[in-house]
Image (cartoon, rainbow, N blue to C red):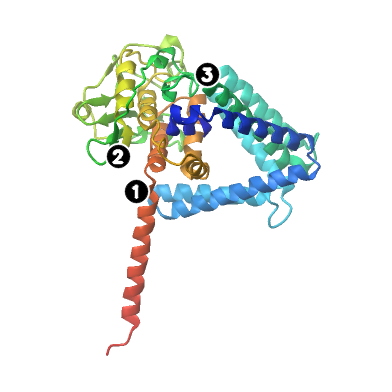
């Protein structure tokens, strides 16, 4: 989430505050160390209580936001809100002592997270797959410690996990602040190693002195998503996997879907392999590796109309009405110089996600910094976008993950349209129903 906040505020807004982030990181590290050292004292209890209250508030906000939506998004956000409230009750020991239950749930979460990291690190082999394996090993060690009740007793499980989490957050803050210190004015955070360490060529993107902000409905930035579940009608049912990774047909074929971006008639980003990839279930393990062996020539589609001539319309369209047009075009002019295609390392979703980062960079640069930062810290979609980025960086960007990331960013950068307007419409609808009910119950004159 911290890295995403850097992008949304932009480089110039944060360069002059690097000392603040450094101090916050050091204080977080100190607090995490104090919690781990004094697990049996009141500091750990206070930290657990604060964490539980924050998680409870986050879950309640998630429930309120989810209630304003409909369909699958409503179900997903309501479920996520209930999960947050449930975990908060475990942390706060409400309505009874939940120490053993909390330890078991944390252990299960660490085990599943480590298992997913190990499976996809060995399968996909992303650039940092060894680091991902090491993190998975740490997760499993923590799970074993929580389940064996050694060296800590059950009542200290939550405090132990909170202390480790504070150390991780503090380390990220200190590292990010130290890198901010060395950046020159006008730096684009979406194009440098501070934000991600993907390809060296991306770090050469030029800066734009005077950005051109697009506000309104003329030529919005549109993200098109073709989900794999819609491209294979006779697919093998695999919940979650077919939506976010790849869908397999009963005849042995496979499809990962597609993602593209459109901005008027002057820009269309859609990356395809020059030779169509025939990924079958038999050679799936070799094709999905993010190694140079699977690099091949690619090409860029000219327009969305060309996509329609060879396939179906996009499944999902996500529109951004406020974005940085100059940053977007600058990114595209640099990225398109290399058409190399890799199914998991440099695919259509990677191009679209990095274009989104370039387009939304600095969108909150003119907002009140601390008030906006506090709002983002409690924004449910901020946590969703951050978790999607962590998952995609450890596995690979797919159209399903790109859709969730773009949807979350759209709701973050367009809050008035997303939440306030829905709440206003619901309030007006409820008022209308009350008036109609009152008129129906009132006796005729």
Q: Classify 10 Å Cα crowding around label 1: few (below 14), some (14-19), many (20 and above).
A: few
Marked residue nearer the N-terminal end (3 or 1): 3
Instruction: Confirm or deny contact between disc 3 and disc 1 (CB under 8 A).
Output: no
Instruction: Confirm or deny contact between disc 1 and disc 2 (CB under 8 A).
Output: yes
Residue indicated by mark 2: 321
Choose mark 3 or mark 1, whichever is in front.
3
C-alpha separation, residue under disc 3 versus residue under disc 1? 37 Å
Q: Is residue 58 above or below residue 36?
A: below
Choose mark 2 or mark 3, whichever is in front.
3
Residue indicated by mark 1: 417
Q: Is mark 2 on a helix, strand or loop?
A: loop
Query: In x, y percent, where is residue 178?
Result: 57, 22
Is 377 displayed left or right of 329 in the figure? right
Q: What element carries label 1?
A: helix
Q: Which residue lies furthest to the bottom in this view?
A: 445
Residue indicated by mark 3: 182
Residue at the image position 29 percent from the left and 18 percent from the top: 333
Marked residue nearer the N-terminal end (1 or 2): 2
């Amino acid at each position: 989430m911290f890295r995403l906040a850097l992008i949304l505020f932009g480089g110039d807004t944060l360069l002059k505050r690097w000392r603040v982030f450094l101090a916050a990181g050091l204080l977080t590290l100190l607090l995490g160390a104090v919690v781990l050292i004094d697990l049996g004292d009141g500091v750990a209890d206070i930290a657990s209580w604060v964490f539980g209250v924050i998680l409870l508030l986050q879950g309640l906000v998630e429930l309120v936001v989810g209630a304003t939506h409909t369909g699958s998004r409503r179900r997903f956000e309501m479920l996520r809100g209930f999960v947050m409230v449930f975990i908060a009750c475990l942390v706060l020991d409400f309505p009874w002592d939940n120490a053993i239950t909390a330890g078991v749930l944390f252990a299960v979460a660490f085990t599943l997270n480590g298992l997913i990291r190990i499976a996809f690190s060995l399968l996909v082999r992303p650039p940092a797959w060894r680091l991902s394996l090491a993190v998975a090993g740490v997760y499993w060690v923590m799970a074993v410690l929580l389940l064996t009740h050694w060296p800590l007793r059950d009542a200290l499980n939550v405090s132990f996990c909170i202390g480790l989490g504070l150390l991780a957050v503090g380390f990220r803050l200190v590292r990010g602040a130290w890198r901010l210190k060395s950046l020159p004015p006008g730096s684009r955070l979406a194009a440098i190693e501070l934000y991600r360490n993907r390809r060296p060529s991306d770090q050469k993107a030029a800066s734009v002195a005077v950005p051109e902000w697009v506000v309104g409905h003329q030529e919005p930035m549109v993200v098109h998503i073709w989900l794999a579940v819609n491209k294979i009608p006779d697919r093998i049912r695999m919940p979650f996997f077919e939506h976010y990774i790849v869908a397999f047909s009963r005849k042995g074929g496979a499809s990962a879907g597609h993602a593209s971006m459109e901005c008027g008639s002057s820009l269309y980003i859609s990356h395809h392999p020059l030779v169509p990839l025939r990924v079958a279930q038999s050679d799936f393990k070799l094709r999905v590796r993010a190694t140079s062996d699977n690099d091949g020539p690619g090409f860029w589609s000219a327009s969305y109309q060309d996509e329609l001539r060879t396939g179906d319309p996009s499944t999902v369209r996500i529109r951004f009405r406020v974005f940085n047009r100059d940053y977007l075009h600058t990114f595209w002019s640099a990225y398109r110089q290399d058409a190399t295609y890799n199914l998991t390392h440099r695919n259509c979703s990677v191009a679209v996600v990095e274009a989104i980062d370039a387009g939304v960079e600095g969108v909150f640069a003119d907002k009140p910094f601390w008030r906006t930062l506090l709002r983002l810290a409690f924004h449910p979609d901020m946590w969703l976008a951050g978790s999607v980025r962590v998952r995609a960086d450890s596995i690979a960007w797919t159209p399903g993950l790109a859709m969730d990331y773009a949807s979350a960013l759209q709701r973050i950068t367009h809050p008035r349209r997303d939440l306030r307007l829905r709440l206003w419409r619901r309030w007006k609808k409820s008022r209308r129903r009350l008036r109609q009910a009152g008129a129906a119950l009132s006796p005729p004159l």
